[in-house]
Amino acid sequence: MKVEVTLSFPESKPNSMAIGIRHMKEDGSFAEDMFLFEKGVGLTKLYRGEQERLMPEYEGTHHGQPSIALQEALPDIQKELDAIKKSVTLQSILDGINMADVYTEASLHAAIEAQTREQQQEVHNLQIAHPQAPVELLSRAVTAEITKKRAVVREKYFASERLYEAKKKQIEQLYPDPQEAAASLSVLNDLFGKQ
């Protein structure tokens, strides 16, 4: 909504100040909403031309023309406010991601490979320490421990995937237009190691 803000000091209301917000209505006509600050009274919102009844010097101002061309001279404040609000909301969505909770597919594969090497090394060490023990028995004992570790790693990965999907959904709700959401989703994909 394009607006013009005016500040005035009503003669009929000493010790007061009026702030008028003139805006263009959908039909192209103008209206002014006024806020009156009176000493000892506080803030009063004046609706639908009330300022003309309370303060005679404001007669004809409610539907008066702006002093400047609202269509050209002032920015579209509502769009700016919406953009700022979306930006702040997006920042809170992204700030809500604890990178310690992000476990990418590459992290999962690297952890499983490391665990496989650990398993092989542990079996080898046990064979050296217990040369008489059957390799199958040693391998089974180590495999049981590594299986538990792999379950923990997989759960971290699946929790990370759930977090990714939740954040993706929040961004898509914030930006229903896919083109508008693309840049934010790209940042999210980068954080989670998505292609």
Image: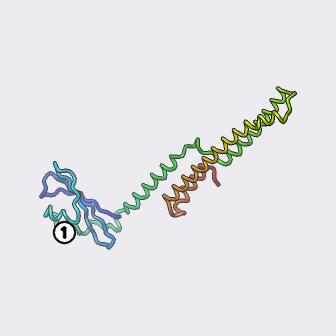
Q: Residue at x 58, y 41 (%)?
A: 100
Q: Residue at x 22, y 53 (%)?
A: 43
Q: Give the vertical position of 175 relative to 91 (above or below).
A: below
Tell me which corner region of the image, top left, top right, bottom left or bottom right, holds residue 99.
top right
Tell me which corner region of the image, top left, top right, bottom left or bottom right, holds residue 113.
top right
Tell me which corner region of the image, top left, top right, bottom left or bottom right, holds residue 21.
bottom left
Q: Secondary structure at mark 1?
A: loop
Visual colour scheme: rainbow
Q: Nearer the viewer, residue 75 or 143?
A: 143
Q: Which residue is mark 1?
A: 60
- 172 sits to left or right of 147: left
| Residue 16 location (% of width, % of height) | 17, 53
Q: Give the vertical position of 140 relative to 80 (above or below).
A: above
* Crowd band around label 1 with a 10 angstrom C-alpha radius: few (<14), some (14–19), many (20+): few
Q: Give the vertical position of 117 relative to 22 (above or below).
A: above
| Residue 80 location (% of width, % of height) | 40, 59
